[in-house]
Amino acid sequence: MKIRKLSVRVPSLRVLALAAVVTGVIGGTVVAQTQPLPAIQWDVRRLDNLDRNVRRLERAITQRNNQGDPVLVESDPELIALQGRVALMDQRLRDMELTVRRVNGDLERLTFQLDEASGDNAALMARLADAEERVAALEAAREAAEAAAREAAEFAARSPTGDAVTDLAAARALLASDPARGRAALELVASTWADTPSGREATWRVGDIIRAGGDQAGAVQQYAQALQGWPTESWAGEVTLKLARGLEATNRDAQACAALGEYQRRYAASSTPALREIAARTRTQANCR
């Protein structure tokens, strides 16, 4: 029995098989093409005819096999190579899909970690801001403490005893033995204890020293500063008269009369007769009405 060997293309895609059969085999005979055929316009009718021809070929092969004249169908090497390439592409596609899934998983994990990191970063920023505020408060407190310490040290340097009355008494005692140092001590008491009765007394006593040196205008400034707010100390009436006499001596009669008016309203009732006599004489000298 003679076995006929027929080489046909059996692709996985029927369209490729149909095209191979129509162009390569017609009635079992290979037709040589001497000229290129025009491009085939595939439509439903042509595809149906091609499908029927392929089915006839399949039935013919089956019938010949049944009659004891088998036909061996060998796969086309190009088709095998094409199938291998398709299989390789399928494998690569599956590998790419696995890679994409893995990358997507990594992206989701990284996104979650990034969200957590953002939350941690916000918490750290809040803690940092709070720490900066605390540090600023501590720095401010430290600077205030240092300023207070410096002020206390300066105050201790200005006030030998730390008490206004005692400092004034020490300055007056020093004035008797050393007038220059005594005046400096009085000025220090006046500046250190400016808003105290002792500081005001030191101020007008400096005015007495200035008046004794012949500076009536400078003495007036010291008296006026000591009498700011019209204090009620026992010396206030006498110093008011000193102010009025200094104003009259520097040709400021109107202001001298005003000072005498304050003396009359505030201090005359508690003054000594000698002070009231000085006030009357000064009123006459200043031409007060």
Image (cartoon, helix red, strand yellow):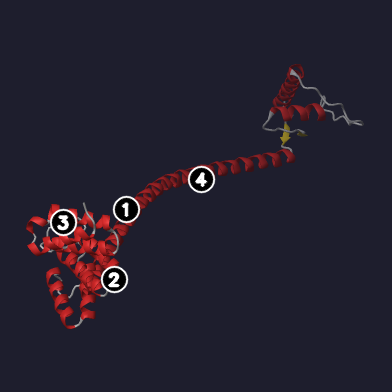
Callout in the foreground (1, 3): 3
Say which residue label 2 marks.
Answer: 215
Mark 2 → mark 1, Cα distance in angstroms = 62 Å
Say which residue label 4 marks.
Answer: 103
Amino acid on which the number 3 mark rests in the picture: Tyr
N-term mark: 4 or 2: 4
Mark 1 → mark 4, Cα distance in angstroms = 40 Å
Q: Quadrant of the N terminus?
A: top right
- Rate crowding at label 4 as few (under 14), some (14 to 19) or many (20 or more) other CA atoms within 10 Å: few
- Rate crowding at label 2 as few (under 14), some (14 to 19) or many (20 or more) other CA atoms within 10 Å: some
Instruction: State left or right for residue 69 relative to residue 233.
Output: right
Q: Secondary structure at mark 4?
A: helix
N-term mark: 3 or 4: 4
Say which residue label 1 marks.
Answer: 130
| Cβ atoms at labels 3 and 4 below 8 Å apart | no
Say which residue label 3 marks.
Answer: 263
Name the quadrant containing residue 88: top right
